[in-house]
Image (cartoon, rainbow, N blue to C red):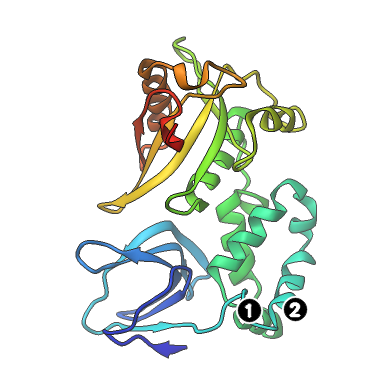
């Protein structure tokens, strides 16, 4: 770890450590807010080895000391060795559908040396507990309906996408009371490819809408997305009226109240 100077320019993805005031936390740097506070993803309590928040604002106190790790999975030759520790974990092997997401979470939350050190000291619970909390597996499994499983996985896409990037989605959104909206994404794959993938999931459903969601900005500690319902495969593309996108944005806000969604007509989320 290296101390952070006031003049230090941090690259997104840098692992930040805050120690002081009986706290020892780390997270992945996203950006600075308007008040120059750090926005961090995947904040881990290093004392208890638990996930504190998927995203939050770091507001250091006078007695806090801030550090950063120069190492990362993209640059450290020990990366493969560290990831082998994760890939040998029984719960990783059990959840084939989550393996890519687990690896992505690990790569943006820790540095390779930490995982290797945890393995040597036989304290890998500090790694495996946050993974279980994040993906609600193992000790943190809930009895969830298939709709909630699908929507929770969709939230992981919303949390992991970078500013300026977009997702394609398919959804089941109706005006019927008591009908839970369902959203599904496979990243930026075409809507037709996405529809085929749904058929292989445990939460198969019949979508009636499709479109695009773009991570437009981060305002006041909140992720802001623009959304359309302009799928050509499951809709009328650029002719999609704003009213349909408003219905989709309303459904998204109901499921994910911590995020903001602005509806656009046609295929507006991708500038068409």
Q: Residues within 10 Å of mark 2 (few under 14, many from 20)?
A: few
Write the residue at 47% across / 15% down: 178
Write the residue at 60% across / 37% down: 185
Secondary-structure class at tag 1: helix
Viewed as shown, does residue 195 lie left or right of 156?
Answer: right
Splitting the image into 4 quarters, where does residue 20 fall? bottom left
Secondary-structure class at tag 2: helix
**Residue 61 drawn above or below residue 97:** below
Camera-nearest residue between 70 and 45: 70
**Looking at the image, do the residues carrying marks 2 and 1 touch, with CB atoms under 8 Å apart?**
yes
Residue 109: image x %, image y %? 54, 67
| Residue that mark 2 sits on | 81
Q: Residue furthest top?
A: 176
Residue 85: image x %, image y %? 74, 72
Camera-nearest residue between 90 and 34: 34
**Residue 266 drawn above or below residue 73:** above
Splitting the image into 4 quarters, where does residue 168 fall? top right
Residue 16: image x %, image y %? 42, 76
Q: Earlier in the sequence, mark 2 or mark 1?
A: 2
Q: How many marks?
A: 2
Splitting the image into 4 quarters, where does residue 29 fall? bottom left
Camera-nearest residue between 138 and 187: 187
Quarter of the image with the C terminus in it: top left
Write the residue at 65% across / 18% down: 206
**Residue 185 drawn above or below residue 26:** above
Q: CA distance from mark 2 to mark 1?
A: 8 Å
| Residue that mark 1 sits on | 112
Residue 60: image x %, image y %? 27, 75
Write the residue at 49% across / 24% down: 230
């Amino acid at each position: 770890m290296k101390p952070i100077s006031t003049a230090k320019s941090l690259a997104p993805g840098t692992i930040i450590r805050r120690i002081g005031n009986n706290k020892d936390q780390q997270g992945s740097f996203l950006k600075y807010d308007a008040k120059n506070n750090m926005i961090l993803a995947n904040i881990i309590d290093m004392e208890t080895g638990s996930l504190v928040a998927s995203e939050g604002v770091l507001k250091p106190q006078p007695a806090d000391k801030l550090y950063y790790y120069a190492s990362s999975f993209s640059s450290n030759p020990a990366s493969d060795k560290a990831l082998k520790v994760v890939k040998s974990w029984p719960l990783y092997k059990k959840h084939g559908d989550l393996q890519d997401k687990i690896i992505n979470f690990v790569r943006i939350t820790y540095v390779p040396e930490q995982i290797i050190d945890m393995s040597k000291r036989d304290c890998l619970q500090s790694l495996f507990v946050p993974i279980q909390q994040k993906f609600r597996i193992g000790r943190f499994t809930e009895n969830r309906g298939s709709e909630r499983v699908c929507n929770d996985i969709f939230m992981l896409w919303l949390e992991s996408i970078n500013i300026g990037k977009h997702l394609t989605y398919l959804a089941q959104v109706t005006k019927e009371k008591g009908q839970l909206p369902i959203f599904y994404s496979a990243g930026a794959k075409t809507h037709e490819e996405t529809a085929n993938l749904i058929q292989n999931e445990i939460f198969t459903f019949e979508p009636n809408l499709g479109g695009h969601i773009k991570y437009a900005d981060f305002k006041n500690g909140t992720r802001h997305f623009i959304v359309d319902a302009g799928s050509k495969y499951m809709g009328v593309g650029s002719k999609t009226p704003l009213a349909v996108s408003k219905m989709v944005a309303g459904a998204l806000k109901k499921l994910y109240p911590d995020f903001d969604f602005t509806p656009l007509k046609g295929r507006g989320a991708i500038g068409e």
